[in-house]
Amino acid sequence: MDRIKRLSNEIMNEYQNKFGTDFSSNKQILNEITIIRSKSLKNKIAGYITKILQRQKKYEQRKKQLIEDENNIDTKDSKRKKSISESTNNASLKEETETNESDKSS
C-alpha cells in the first residue's frame, strides 16, 4: 500500500490538473502519462488518486457549507440583536411618553 500511495502522490504532484473524480477517466489518463504494465497496480493507483480527489472535493463542499452556515447565523444574530435593541428603545420611549403625559396631567 505504501508503494501505491508513494506512486500516486508522485503522479499527482506533476499531473494533478489532469485527473478528476471519475475512476475510468483517471485510468485512461494514467495510461497516457505513465507506462504501468501491471493492470492491478494501474487500477490501484487510479483508484487511490480518485479517492484522494473525491475527499478533497467533499472537504471543499463541507468547508463552503460551514462558511455559509456561519454567515447565516451571524446575520440572524445581528438581526435579532437589532430587533431587540429596537424593541428596547421603543419600550423606553413609551415609558418616557407615559411619564411625560402623567406629569402634564398632574
Image (cartoon, grey):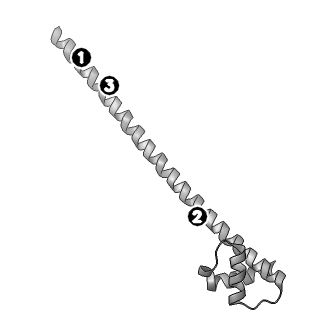
Q: Nearer the viewer, residue 104 or 81?
A: 81
Cα distance, mark 1 to mark 3?
12 Å
Callout 2 secondary element? helix
At horizontal 72% and vertical 74% (from top left) the residue drawn is: 23
Instruction: Give the side of residue 40 with respect to residue 102, left or right.
Output: right
Residue 81 locus on image (x, y percent): 40, 38
Q: Badge 1: how crowded within 10 Å, few (<14), some, or many (20+)? A: few
Task: Please state, as top left, top right, bottom left or bottom right, where the C terminus lies in the image.
Answer: top left
Chain-order first, disc 1 or disc 2: 2
- Tell me which label, 3 or 2, sits earlier in the chain: 2
SS for tag 1? helix
Say which of marks 1 and 3 sits in front.
3
Sequence-wise, the earlier of marks 1 and 3 is 3
Q: Nearer the viewer, mark 3 or mark 2?
A: 2
Where disc 3 sits, the SS reads helix
Q: Residue at x 62, y 66 (%)?
A: 57
Residue 72, labelled with which disc? none
Residue 31 image offset from top left, x and y in percent? 72, 87
Q: Position of residue 53 (x, y in %)?
A: 66, 71
Q: In the rendered structure, are the residues bearing label 1 and label 2 in contact, judged by CB atoms less than 8 Å apart?
A: no
* Mark 3 residue crowding within 10 angstroms, few (<14) / some (14–19) / many (20+): few
Q: Which residue is mark 1?
A: 99
Residue 91's mark?
3
